[in-house]
Image (cartoon, rainbow, N blue to C red):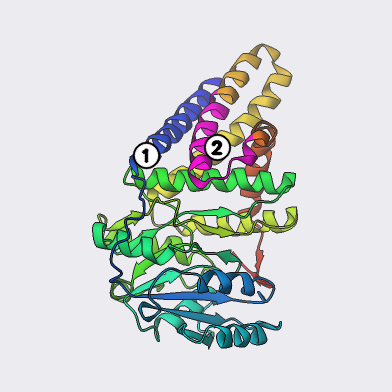
Amino acid sequence: MIYISILISIIYLALIVSFIGGFEKVKLIKNKNAVPKNSFSIIIPFRNEAHNLPNLLNSLSALKYPVELFEIILVNDDSEDGFTEIIEKFTKQHPALNLYLLQNNRKTNSPKKDALNTAINVSNFEWIVTTDADCLVPKLWLQMFNQFIEVEKPVFISAPVKFCTQNSFLFHFQNLNFTSLMGSTIGGFGIDKPFMCNGANLCYNKDAFFKLNGFEENTNIASGDDIFLMEKMFKAYPKKVKFLKSDENIVETNSENTWKLFINQQIRWASKSASYTNLFAKFVGIVVFLENLILLVLGVYTLLFPQFCIYVLLVFTAKIIVDFILIAQTSLFLISTKSLKYYLPVSLLYPFFIVFTGCLSAFKNYEWKDRSFKK
C-alpha cells in the first residue's frame, strides 16, 4: 500500500511540476495596438439569463474594435424570462452594433452545440468567438485575438477565464479549484499537450470548423463543445492550437451560488471525461483522482497503523506545496489572489470533494440550464 501510494504521488508531483514549468513557457502577450484586420462573429447561446444579459451586453458595447469587423449573435435556447425587452432596449441604445437574435434549432441531445451550430451556419465573419451569457468581456478582447492571429497564425485559440470576486467560503473553494484548472490548462499548452479549455473564452477559424465537421461525433453528450472541438483541432492542426496568455484578454464569469449547484457543475464536467479522445486528458484525470483517493486511504490506514503517519504527512505536504505553486502563479496572472489565504483549509477538504464528485459522476445524471441529462 505504502509503495503504491508513493508511486502515485511521484507521478502526480511530476505532472504538476510539468504544468508549473509549462505555465511559464507560455509567453505573456501585451497589447501592441495591431491594426484591426480580422473579422469576428461573437456567438452567445443563452437560456433564462435575463438577470445576466444587461451586464454582458454592456461589456460587449464597450469593445475597442471597429464595429464593421464584428457581429454579435445571441441564440435563445427556450428561455422563459424577460430577455426580449432587454435585447430590444439594448439594440435601440446601440444601433451601430451588428446584433442578431436567433432561436435555437434543436437537432441533437446537446442544446448548446445546436445553438452554436445555428449561429455559425448564418455567421458572416471569418472567426468564431464564444462566451457565455453570465460573463463580462474585456475591452481589448477582440483586439488581442486579432493581434494573436496575425502573429501566431492559429486555427484555435483558448484564452483565460476567471471568477468575478465574491466573499464567501464557497466562492473561495470554487475559485481555488477553478484557478488550479486554469493553471493546468495553460501548463498543458506550455508542454504541447493541451487537454482543457473553456467555452467562455474561445476563438476558432470558421473554415477549419466546417472542414472538421464541427461538433459531429459528440452531439450525444450535452456539454463539452469546447474540449471536444479542441481535441479535433489539435489532432488536425497540432501546431495551430494555441493559448492566448494575456491579462488584457481575461473573461470574467460567475461562480455557483450554492454547494448543490457547484457539485452538479463538477459532475457535469467530470461526466464527459470518459468520452475524451485525448489520452493525456484521461491520464491527468485518473492521476488527480488517484492522488486524492490515496490521501484518504492513507488517512484511514494510519488510524490502524500509526507508525505510517510520517508517509501521510510527506505525501500531503509535497502535494500542497506543488499545488500551491501552480495556483499562486495562476492567481497572480489572473489578478485574483484573495482566495490564497483560504488555501490550507480548502486543501484539507479537497480530497474528500474530488473523490465524492468523481464517484458521483460515474453514476449520477446531472442538470444543466433547468434540464436533466443522462450520462
Instruction: Determine whether the residue tagged by mark 2 lies in a helix, strand or loop.
Output: helix
**In the drawing, what numbered circle is on residue 33?**
none
Question: Does residue 296 show up?
Answer: yes
Tally of numbered tags:
2
* Badge 1 or badge 2: first in the primary sequence: 1
298 w.r.t. 254: above or below: above
Q: Residue at x 62, y 30 (%)?
A: 295
- Give the amino acid type for the residue marked by disc 2 in the picture: Leu
227 w.r.t. 180: above or below: below
228 w.r.t. 294: above or below: below
Horizontal placement of 41 versus 54: left or right? left
Instruction: State the residue in front, 217 or 323.
Output: 323
Q: Estimate the x, y position of residue 194 in percent, counting from the top left.
A: 37, 50
Instruction: State the residue in front, 16 or 146.
Output: 146
Q: Estimate the x, y position of residue 134 in percent, counting from the top left.
A: 61, 67
Question: Does residue 1 show up?
Answer: no
Dot 2, crowdedness within 10 Å: few (<14), some or many (≥20)?
some
Question: Quadrant location of the N terminus?
Answer: top right
Instruction: State the residue in front, 94 or 156.
Output: 94
Q: Estimate the x, y position of residue 236 in percent, counting from the top left.
A: 26, 62
Structural distance between the alpha carbons of marks 1 and 2: 22 Å
- Give the amino acid type for the residue marked by disc 1 in the picture: Gly
Q: Residue at x 51, y 40 (%)?
A: 332
Q: Residue at x 56, y 86 (%)?
A: 91
Horizontal placement of 19 versus 149: left or right? right
Residue occupied by mark 1: 22
**In the drawing, what numbered circle is on residue 290?**
2
Range shown magenta: 318-340
Res 271 quadrant in image: bottom right
Residue 112 on the magenta segment = no
Residue 329 on the magenta segment = yes
Q: Residue furthest top?
A: 307
